[in-house]
Amino acid sequence: MNQVQENKMSMAYAAVQVLDENKTIWDGVPAMVQAHDEFKANITATEQAVSKQIADITGHAKDKTAAEDNMIAKTLSVAGSVMAFATVNGDNGLAEAMNITPSELRRYRDSVVAQRCMGVHDAATLNAAALVSYGVAAGDIVDLKARIDKYLSLIAQPRNKITARKGATAEIGALIRDTMKLLNYRIDRLMQQFAFSHKEFHKQYFNARIIIDQHGQKDAPAEKAA
């Protein structure tokens, strides 16, 4: 939410407070009741959109980094044993495939590093029985798969949060515009009927409708100025 939108939301809070405090004056006017309900619904929807917009994605990014570290650590451990096994058995192709370094894994993109680690898992699975003598138990292979799966599940979360944040930003803009239209063309107009019968209420409402920016400048509603 930008500064202009924040200013308008502050005005909306002030205006709805005046309306709520004087409900007995206008609740006999069905059109006013309907407009008021829509007004409050817009405020609630905007608050929910703002919550999405300001959601902190750093926690998800940290979780992904931790999961990657755990996956890489286990991958290197298993790959080392598979490489030793392959070397003893003269399988140069497998030995070279298992010749992995931490820096190599960390320079891959998210999905690629997961596939590289999965290649180690698959090689270990094919040679599981023989690898027991090299310090790799069945549980180690299962653990490696679990770490890969956890990492894969976390890859998309920060991106999804960013996408949701962008969607919320657009939603806020639409809601603010709709709220201003609702105020300008419905509630402000309906309030004119109370100009003489309930002068203080009328005055309080239009005072609340003045938008004040961060520099203290005021922007009164066009209907009031007219």
Image: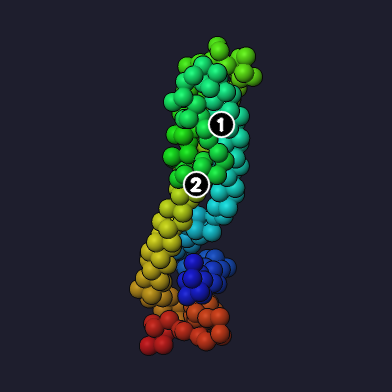
Query: From the image, which quarter does the C terminus lie in?
Result: bottom left
Mark 2 and mark 1 residues within 8 Å of each other at the beta carbon: no
In three-dimensional space, the C-alpha distance between marks 2 and 1, rounded to whole angstroms, equals: 15 Å
The picture places residue 115, in percent across and down from the top left corner, at: 44, 34
> How crowded is the residue under tag 2: few (<14 C-alpha within 10 Å), some, or many (20+)?
few
Residue 197 in view (yes/no): no
Q: Secondary structure at mark 1?
A: helix
Find disc 1 in the rendering and name its residue.
75
Q: Residue at x 48, y 39 (%)?
A: 113
> How crowded is the residue under tag 1: few (<14 C-alpha within 10 Å), some, or many (20+)?
many
Task: Name the N-terminal-most of marks 2 and 1.
Answer: 1
The picture places residue 153, in percent across and down from the top left corner, at: 49, 37
Find disc 2 in the rendering and name its residue.
107
Check disc 2 and give the amino acid type.
Arg
Check disc 1 and give the amino acid type.
Thr
Q: Secondary structure at mark 2?
A: loop
